[in-house]
Image: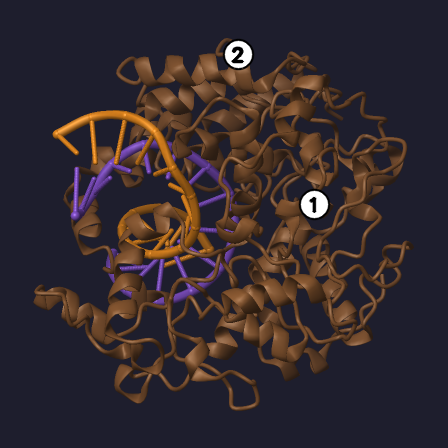
Chain colours: A brown, B purple, C orange
DNA sequence: GTCCCTTTGAAGGTC
DNA sequence: GACCTTCAAAGGGAC
């Protein structure tokens, strides 16, 4: 793999932002090539993802040397084009990050127009099998026997569940046409411009053709003007849709409303005039600059509508659970796209708000924060480690992994090792309508929340029943914990220990159910 | 009206 | 370094 980066990467000052980006889903790399690759170091994999991007940014050609298929230069960022045969691994066929302006500017162009994907295109194909019947990752080369059934097709063809004002998609394509649409919104930044009084310097570099008048609301992280002025597409998180109901309901939107009342732009640092709450005033003195979305958030934002459309579920909590499992079912490349988008968003965020820190937002939802703080340790995940140790009689050195929300070895991993040593067949998902299946499960879990085994590591979250129900979707309760996707000793992230127990991290632990085709774990 | 739920990831803080 | 905590989005549900 060409390493086009190096010291020059520092010029951006933010390339290392992606250093923590990792694709945390390991696929069943059963073919010979992937077996070879499995011996590679995780860091190499990780850096490769970054290299792709950095090379792209520098050369203007996405993933040079990595993907042979060149961008179609579609203005639609991240546009997926279904593979003619499989309709699934289209992710490889598209240059993930063609800059809509055709240039090589690295500023975020993420998530433009994914919502506008045609039915059957791209990510929608995760749906037929759903999280239970996930097709294998594209790179596995297994012809996915998935086709859009009529039900799904109907679901995809239906009117969007969450229509957007003006009939526009929430995420502007930033094609010329859509740029005009976006311009018609003239959406101010979601990160309100700060003033000197705010303690932040002007968030927009003077080089950016941003007029303060266009930045009147925090509802828009970044003004399309930014993208338009630079000829760039903007990420959906950076260019969110016009205010939705939830926007207006959320506490963030409360702030947004206060901004709208108080001013239209650069005076956003003013406290809300209408607010009688001094605390709010204090809070509003400093514009609330939202965190850049991480990869999963970007994915969620993009896929939520689809899941909602395909399922009868409406509760975001349930939807998020589905999305969480779908996220783990994404191929490495698919996830990489979102990690890259997130990296770009962080990069742009850092450029716009050099002084901003995630800490600045701590306590923004003060009540919520206090309430969480007031919770007993048992209610929080923080005590799960102790609970897990107690439950399984682990010594104090024992740690757990991702299912337990902690890293390193845990009882589940030990169980997985034991299972793997006996070449245990992995549970097969039933290829059926995942949504209807999950509807049942999710309904059950809401009823069974009190029956959930709160001490089970996997159930250590705040809704034990819910997690256990979903867990049962992934694998029957009687089944042992899912074995690592990499046979023992072949995990590419095992740098030292052949068994790699101590090396197992959240990155190497698959929470999602094994996909069909992953039936057997063989141990060498 | 407000908060919870639920997910993953990022980041800051604590020990 | 490991762990903990908070926040980011979303919207129905609970209070």
Identify the subunit bearing mark 1.
Answer: A
Q: Position of residue A361 (x, y in %)?
A: 30, 64
User: On the same chain: label 2 and label 1?
Assistant: yes
Q: Left or right? Give the position of A193 relative to A128.
A: left
Most extreme residue toward the top is A478
Answer with the quarter of the image where residue A1 lies: bottom right
- At 50% across and 69% down in the image, what residue appears? A186
- Number of residues whose C-alpha sits closer than 10 Å to that of mark 2, classed few (under 14), some (14–19) or many (20 or more): some
Residue under numbered circle 2: A476
- What chain letter is assigned to the residue under label 2? A
Q: Does residue A21 sit above or below A146 in this rendering?
A: below
| Residue that appears at 84% across and 48% down | A93
| Residue lying furthest front | A166
Q: Position of residue A199 (x, y in %)?
A: 29, 84
Q: Is residue A511 above or below residue A284?
A: above
Residue A509 seen in the figure: no
Q: Position of residue B2 (x, y in %)?
A: 17, 47
Q: Residue at x 81, y 30 (%)?
A: A30
Q: Nearer the viewer, mark 2 or mark 1?
A: 1
Residue A178: name its quadrant. Answer: bottom right
Give the mark nearest the N terminus, 2 or 1: 1
Residue depicted at 29% across the width and 41% down the height: A382
Which quarter of the image is occupied by the C terminus of chain A?
top right
Q: Are marks 2 and 1 in contact (CB under 8 Å)?
A: no
Which mark, residue A334?
1
């Amino acid at each position: 793999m060409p390493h086009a980066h190096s010291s020059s990467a520092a010029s951006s000052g933010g390339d290392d932002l992606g250093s923590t980006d990792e694709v945390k889903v390991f696929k069943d790399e059963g073919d010979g090539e992937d077996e070879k690759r499995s011996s590679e170091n995780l860091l190499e994999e990780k850096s490769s993802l970054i290299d792709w991007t950095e090379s792209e940014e520098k050369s203007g050609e996405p993933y040079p040397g990595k993907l042979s298929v060149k961008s179609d230069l579609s203005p639609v960022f991240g546009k997926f084009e279904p593979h003619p045969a499989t309709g699934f691994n289209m992710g490889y066929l598209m240059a993930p990050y063609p800059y809509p302006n055709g240039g090589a500017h690295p500023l975020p162009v993420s998530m433009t127009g994914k919502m506008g994907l045609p039915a059957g295109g791209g990510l929608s194909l995760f749906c037929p099998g759903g999280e239970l019947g996930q097709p294998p990752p594209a790179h596995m080369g297994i012809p996915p026997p998935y086709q859009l059934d009529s039900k799904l097709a109907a679901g995809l063809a239906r009117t969007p569940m969450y229509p957007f004002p003006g009939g526009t998609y929430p995420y502007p394509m930033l094609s010329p046409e859509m740029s005009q649409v976006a311009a018609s919104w003239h959406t101010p930044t979601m990160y309100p411009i700060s003033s000197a009084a705010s303690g932040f310097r002007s968030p927009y570099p003077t080089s950016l053709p941003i007029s303060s008048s266009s930045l009147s609301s925090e509802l828009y992280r970044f003004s399309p003007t930014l993208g338009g002025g630079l000829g760039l597409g903007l990420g959906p998180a950076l260019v969110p849709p016009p205010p939705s109901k939830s926007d207006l309901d959320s506490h963030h939107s409360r702030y947004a409303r206060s901004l709208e009342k108080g001013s239209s732009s650069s005076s956003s640092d003013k406290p809300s005039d209408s607010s009688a709450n001094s605390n709010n005033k204090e809070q509003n003195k400093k514009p609330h600059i939202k965190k850049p979305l991480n990869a999963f958030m970007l994915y969620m934002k993009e896929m939520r509508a689809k899941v909602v459309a395909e399922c009868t579920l409406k509760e975001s909590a349930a939807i998020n659970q589905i999305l969480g499992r779908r996220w783990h079912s994404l191929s490495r490349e698919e996830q990489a796209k979102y990690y890259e988008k997130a990296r770009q968003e962080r990069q742009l965020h850092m450029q716009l708000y050099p002084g901003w820190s995630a800490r600045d937002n701590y306590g923004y939802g003060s009540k919520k924060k206090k309430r969480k703080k007031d919770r007993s340790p048992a209610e929080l995940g923080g005590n799960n480690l102790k609970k897990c140790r107690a439950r399984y009689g682990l010594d104090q050195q024992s740690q757990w992994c991702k299912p337990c929300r902690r890293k390193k070895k845990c009882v589940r991993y030990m169980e997985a090792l034991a299972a793997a040593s006996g070449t245990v067949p992995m549970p097969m998902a039933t290829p059926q309508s995942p949504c209807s299946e999950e509807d049942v499960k999710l309904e059950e879990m809401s009823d069974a929340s009190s029956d959930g085994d709160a001490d089970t590591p996997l159930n250590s979250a705040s809704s034990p029943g819910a997690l256990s129900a979903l867990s049962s979707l992934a694998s029957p309760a009687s089944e042992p914990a899912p074995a690592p996707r990499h046979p023992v000793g072949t995990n590419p992230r095992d740098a030292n220990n052949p068994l790699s127990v101590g090396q197992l991290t959240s990155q190497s632990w698959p929470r999602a159910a094994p996909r069909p085709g992953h039936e057997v774990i063989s141990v060498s």
